[in-house]
Amino acid sequence: AQSVSQHNHHVILSEAASLELGCNYSYGGTVNLFWYVQYPGQHLQLLLKYFSGDPLVKGIKGFEAEFIKSKFSFNLRKPSVQWSDTAEYFCAVIRYGGSQGNLIFGKGTKLSVKP
Amino acid sequence: DGGITQSPKYLFRKEGQNVTLSCEQNLNHDAMYWYRQDPGQGLRLIYYSQIVNDFQKGDIAEGYSVSREKKESFPLTVTSAQKNPTAFYLCATQRTELYNEQFFGPGTRLTVL
């Protein structure tokens, strides 16, 4: 069965530090990948998505992610984090097969940024 | 004001009672989804509906039921058969075309006492 793994449960960084959150997926075929963010008390919202083309995807608020097919990875990066980036981040992949269009989510990574 | 409305924001129920969570959307999206979010577990799919009057079980449908009588509405009933109903419930919508993102509501936190 398809799955998504996020390596870090909780990451703590100081402001201006660089961020990389890991995401690996299990499906070997064509994939569509997403990163969602949940700020404290707010809706889950889309950060960025990859469907095809350039494997380096840029999203909102200075985030980017790189799709590496050979590594089954879609890691999220930001060169310099801010206190306002404190949130929970979820990687997701579109499920293929009987439930097309549904998303499979990773377990999430909580990011705490110290001012 | 376009979007997804979930009500109530917080809900408390006694064990053994059924409870219905509301999800309404005015985005004109065909597909709607219910997820359950537990700490450290990510989001898990309960039920989804791609068109009116049709819905499918997700990964953790046991103890839940849904209906889709109108395009705008997709209520979720948490029944007494759900063994561990205390959780944060998220409703989402999606346009019919594949590969589009899902849009999420603000969620309902259900606590069963």
Image (cartoon, grey):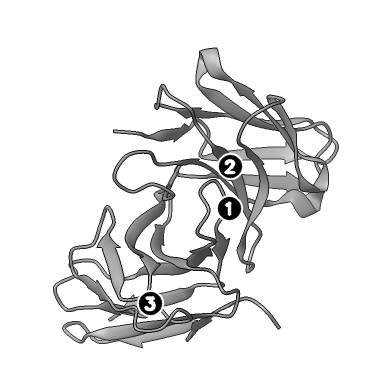
Which residue corresponds to mark 3? B110
The crowd level at tag 1 (other Cα within 10 Å; few <14, some 14-19, many 20+) is many
- Residue type at mark 1: give it: Glu
Q: Secondary structure at mark 1?
A: loop
Which residue corresponds to mark 2? A34
Instruction: Give me the C-alpha separation between circle 2 and circle 3.
Output: 27 Å
Q: Is residue A100 above or below residue B93?
A: above
- Residue at point 20%, 82% (across, down): B15
Instruction: Give me the C-alpha separation between circle 3 and circle 1.
Output: 26 Å
| Residue B20: percent from left, percent from top | 32, 84
Q: Secondary structure at mark 3?
A: strand
- Residue type at mark 2: give it: Phe
Q: In this rendering, which labeled residue sits more in front, label 2 or label 3?
A: 2
Quarter holding the C terminus of chain B is: bottom left
Q: In this rendering, which labeled residue sits more in front, label 1 or label 2?
A: 1
Which residue corresponds to mark 1? B101
Instruction: Give me the C-alpha separation between circle 1 and circle 2.
Output: 8 Å
Q: Is residue B12 left or right of residue A67?
A: left
Q: Quadrant of residue B104?
A: bottom right
* Marked residue nearer the N-terminal end (3 or 1): 1
Q: Is residue B73 left or right of residue A42?
A: left
